[in-house]
Image: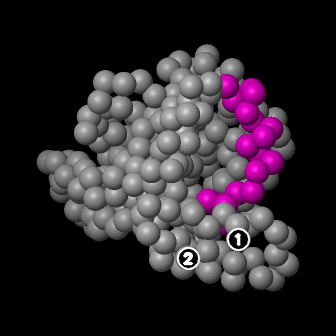
Amino acid sequence: MSMSKAYGMQTKAEWDAAWRKWFERYSRSLPQIGMWIHCNYGSECSTFLEIGAGSARESRYLARYAEQVYCVDYAPAVVEMVNASGPPSNLIAKTMDAFQLDVADRAVDCTFHKGFWVLFASDHDLGRLLREQVRVSDKVALALVHNGRNRRMVADFTERAKNDELFNVRFFDPRWIQEFVKKSLAADGVSADVRIRKYGGAGWMYRWPWPGFLSSLRDRVATFIYACLPWSRVESIVVEIRRQTLKVK
């Protein structure tokens, strides 16, 4: 499945320019992924790290409940905009290379990214990114990628990509990505439980206001609905990685 095609923008300057255009729009959008992560992992994790954070919308939401949240991006202008937007005191945004994170081993309870791997055509690069993310994760590492079995979404993105590089992304098959992650970690001596979960496809649940005291119920119901949907309707594949042991080589 390794490819030579380029996805998304290729330089920091291009990403800086793109996020200057998209930052406000994405910042104002509902942090549904942050809600889903809090619902499913908030009880066991108190620190979070978002990789390739962009607007940091999800990190900002998680900061309401977490002890500490970090968000990193390799485009300097993105991090500058996050810091200029008045983030909460327990949200720290930094410029960082995801291939070589300036973070200690197992320093963060939960690491995650949304639509980050979809920008990489090289399986070798994906393996490097995976192993670096797992290195800094103590309890769980999450990777959300676009679901290639949702043919309607693939066709929509293909059409939109003709005019907007935002939609020029790589899609994945659930079975392939699970096996790829297992093999990549095993090659590095990492023993881990790798689980595939479903996210997205029931956005209608968030299209009307829910009273605050019912928000947790909404997120639990949404998680249940996602799990019940056929792969043809699911938006994202969630790779959940729980590391067990690391062999010393």
Magenta stretch: includes residue 142: no
Q: Amino acid at mark 2?
A: Ile
Which of the two discs, 1 and 2, labels the residue nearer the N terminus? 1
Q: How many other residues sit within 10 Å of disc 1, few (<14), some (14-19) or many (≥20)?
A: some
Residue at 46 percent of width and 66 percent of height: 198
Q: Which residue occupies the foreground of this view, 213 or 5?
A: 5
Q: Is residue 80 placed above or below 190 in the rendered structure?
A: above
Q: Which residue occupies the foreground of this view, 82 or 121?
A: 121
Q: Is any atom of residue 87 visible in this view?
A: no
Disc number at residue 27?
A: none
Q: Secondary structure at mark 2?
A: helix
Residue at 80 percent of width and 48 percent of height: 28
Give the extent of the magenta segment.
Answer: 18-35
Residue at 48 percent of width and 72 percent of height: 229
Residue 51 x, y percent position in the rendering: 53, 44
Residue 69 x, y percent position in the rendering: 64, 55
Q: Is residue 202 placed above or below 163 in the rendered structure?
A: below
Question: On the rendered structure, is 112 left or right of 170?
Answer: right
> Which residue is labeled 2 in the image?
225
Q: Secondary structure at mark 1?
A: helix
Q: Is any atom of residue 45 visible in this view?
A: yes
Q: In 3D space, how far apart are the residues under numbered discs 1 and 2 (Cα atoms)? A: 10 Å
Q: Amino acid at mark 1?
A: Met
| Residue 156, quarter of picture | top right
Disc number at residue 205?
A: 1
Residue at 57 percent of width and 58 percent of height: 48
